[in-house]
Amino acid sequence: MKKVSLSIVLIIIFGATAIAGKDKTTFKEEIEGAQEVKVYFNVTEIVDRESDRKMKQTNPKGQTDIRTVMPNEFSSNDIKNNVITTLNTEMQVSAFKLGDVSELGESSDKQTQYLDLSKLPDGIIAIVQVEGDYIRFVDMAKGGEVSNSMEIKANMFFYEIKGGVAQKIKVNMGMGANLGSTKTSSIKTPKLEGLDYLEMNFSALSLLESYTNLIKEYSSDFAKRMLKKHEKSLSKRK
């Protein structure tokens, strides 16, 4: 009798779970429901982030001096509009619109990419975070030889805004959508070099073409995956 009762309970639980799964809103439906999703491009400096991290361990307000401005070409309207068009076309929506990041203030919240989202109206927004890294890897096994390079990468994060509070939408297990990364060849030096050396030997503009192609390709891949998941979900509801 107990076995029968347990079986019945399990059937009810699994049945309820299956029904709930069928009714789950897809990411595409959330975007469509929002009607307008502004995409803010936050293009930051090129920084030796490892050096910056170590400095903040002893001084939370400290900053490494190994940093330089990202060229304006990486935040061109052509690149931004290309991403917006790609997202709308490949996901088969019309909600994505270009937002103006200069309208957002600064924040101490790392989860919002240090942008103040508290004054935004309720809804869904996206932040495309573009970062540059100076990488100086010290190989102690080779007497302190240093491998120097530069990397530029982009990721897209989605947030739901409610009453001035931003909650990250878990896309790709909360890590956001990877929009690609591109890196220079490595140059070896016998010791750590400073900013002047890095600026002289690594030009961000040498990565602009590959960055432009990758951010479009990865935006397309992401949108297509979201559309495919949506169509798969619809098929289960029938």
Image (cartoon, helix red, strand yellow):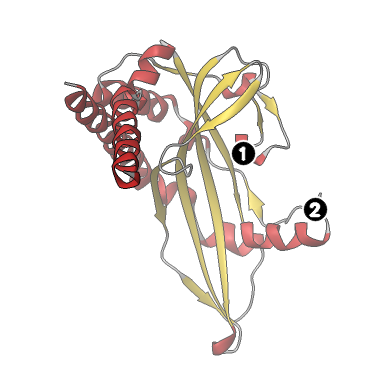
Res. 226 visible in picture: yes
- Would you name the residue on which mark 2 appears? 62
Residue 50 location (% of width, % of height): 63, 62
Horizontally, residue 54 falls left or right of residue 123, namely: right
Q: From the viewer's perspective, is residue 156 above or below residue 77?
A: below
Sort mark 1 into few (<14), some (14-19) or many (20+) by Cα contacts within 10 Å: few
Q: Quadrant of residue 94?
A: top left
Rounded to the nearest angstrom, the CA distance separating label 2 from label 1 is 20 Å
Residue 13 is labelled as none
Q: Measuring 27% from the left and 24% from the top, which residue is drawn there?
A: 91
Along the line of sight, which residue is nearer the eye, 31 or 155? 31
Residue 150 location (% of width, % of height): 50, 58
Q: From the viewer's perspective, is residue 232 above or below residue 138?
A: above
User: Which quarter of the rendering shows the C terminus?
Assistant: top left
Sort mark 2 into few (<14), some (14-19) or many (20+) by Cα contacts within 10 Å: few
Residue 111 is labelled as 1
Say which of marks 2 and 1 sits in front.
1
The residue type indicated by label 2 comes to Gly
Q: Secondary structure at mark 2?
A: loop
Residue 205 location (% of width, % of height): 45, 47
Res. 216 visible in picture: no
The residue type indicated by label 1 comes to Gln
Q: Measuring 38% from the left and 23% from the top, which residue is drawn there?
A: 81
Along the line of sight, which residue is nearer the eye, 45 or 27? 27
Q: Measuring 20% from the left and 31% from the top, which residue is drawn there?
A: 232
Residue 122 location (% of width, % of height): 57, 13
